[in-house]
Image (cartoon, grey):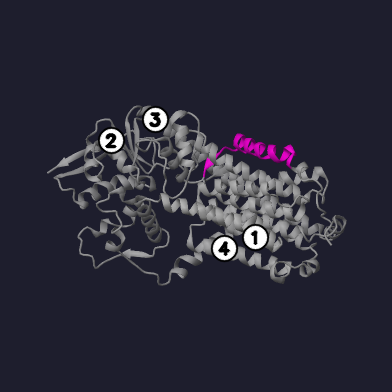
Amino acid sequence: MSTLTKMDNNNRVFKNSRVYLLPLLVFVMWGGFFGLYYESNDDFAIDLLLRGITAAEPVANFHLYMYGWSQLVSFLYTHVPQVPWYGFLLYGLLYLASVFLLHCVEILFNNAVKGRYIVLIDVVIMHLFISILYFKINFSKPAVLLAGIVLVWLVTRWLYTADKITKKDTVLALVMFTAAWGLRPGAAMIGLVLAAPLVTFIPFGTAVKRIIIPFALLIGMLQAVVMITATKEGAAYKAIDIDKAKLIDYHVYKLNNNNKNENIHIFNETLVKYYGFNDEKIFNNNFFPQYYVADYSGLVKREGVAKVKRVFYDVIRQFFPVFSIIALMLLVIDFSEAKRSKGWFGISAFTIIVLYHVFFLTILLALSLFTHMPPRIMQPVTILYLVCVFVMYMKFMPNVMVYKEKLKKYKIIIASLLAIGFLLQVKLLSGIIIESKFDQNNKEKYLYYLSEKYKGKLLIEGGLSYANLNPLRSYGFYNYSKVYSLSGWPAFDPSQRAFRQQLTGYADFGPAMKKLIQRPDAVWVLTPDLSQFLPIYFSARGTGADWNIQLKKLPDTPSPYVHECQASLITY
């Protein structure tokens, strides 16, 4: 029988300052010693759109995500542009997720170990679980973790506290889930689904009343708002993005050789990678049906196996220390009690625990096959799984002294696992830190150089990399009159038609580009591939006029990754 008795007053846990201070200390420590980084290009591109640097005005509608948050952050940038509001938003939501996680830890271990050991457990969990998320941030991470951890928190309160779940607890959890869902709905739903099996440990009636019905109603209302506010531009944007992923990520599409267009070779992966420069004449909803055919034969063997192997390898590599702790817990869990304990519909707790492991592996497999499963998804998903496992296992831990005696028998195994885990974690993080810091320093130098050299000019960029930049800096982008992106998903954002109208007087791509090429204040910063492909594309697309683009590389470009170019018209 478990000796984790109910806490008489859970308010004491909430008053523990360490739960609120420790995430701040980890953030300051990691940021101060190792730096802060964006994991991918996406977030800095979002930040530039929210600031209105790569759009006609601050973008308040991203159509597929940032619901509510984009309106708030763009408003703040409009009035106080010097503050990195988007970075603060991501770290703020991740901080809230960290606080809820530590609340769960405090509740779980409150009566099992002494206070000073709880602090140690908090510190270990913050460094193993959360520090890597603070270190490399992406808007998917806080969405997954916050949405899932609030549900874990509700279940933990029911199982291990005397207060159970109050109406205030449910309301607070719903508010937090809404915040996560607004950031990225799909990511928030992944977090919620991953934590959902824990609800079966709560009596069915209570679970329905306090959790299932409130969350179902909230999700229904949120989806209704999305449907009501949906736009044609957003629907087209989503459809094109799905088709692009099929080609670039899964290689489902191949060029349709039956198409007799003499320039079909131009409409290849390179053009799709650049989102067709948002050239609505070519890159529209008819693009893929016209120039590509789907080929699903051998998809799983061709793409799926490699993706699954990579994901499972990365999960074990990054979270080996935590999996080791779970393995140690298996040595002392009283499985006989788990088999006797009954959940919903008479299913034993032991069966639920086993099924949850299978459920997680299924989720991991599905995400591996149908998404990139990059670290921004893999890390919070794995963290949530491990927290859920702890919540279930702790319910069946025997008396503290009993498992102390048991663990003494395995002290060599324990010491070996901890040593291996520590060394692997040091090796992993040191490699990431060195690589990220080196990349950030190089990019910062070049971006500041550009902002000083071309102050007041129009920067037309294609291929600038924003991964590993600091979320709390703007890198002189306010020095330019504007920045127009030719590549990546920001180039395809619906806001870009209005932006071209503002810059040139034309919303359509062809006439707008002709005007941009003629602007004397424009400087083009392009990757070598793009600087070569763009003139070929213009020649092939047919502009309806006797002109083409010539890009001449400036000789003093200090970066090997991009070319600074001057553009001019070739007339015939």
Specify whether 265 is left or right of 400.
left
**Is disc 2 surrounded by few (<14), some (14 to 19) or many (20+) residues within 10 Å?**
some
Q: Say if mark 4 contacts mark 1, CB within 8 Å.
A: no
Mark sitting on residue 503: 2
Seen from the viewer's position, the closer of residues 1 and 366 is 1
Q: Residue at x 63, y 35 (%)?
A: 28
Q: Is residue 510 left or right of residue 346?
A: left
Marks 1, 2: nearer the viewer:
1
Per the image, the residue denoted by label 3 is: 451
Residue 56, percent from left and from top? 34, 36
User: What range is drawn magenta here?
Assistant: 14-38
> Which kind of residue does numbered mark 4 sit on?
Ile
Identified by mark 2, the residue type is Leu
Q: Is residue 128 magenta?
A: no
Q: Are marks 2 and 4 in contact (CB under 8 Å)?
A: no
SS class, disc 2:
helix
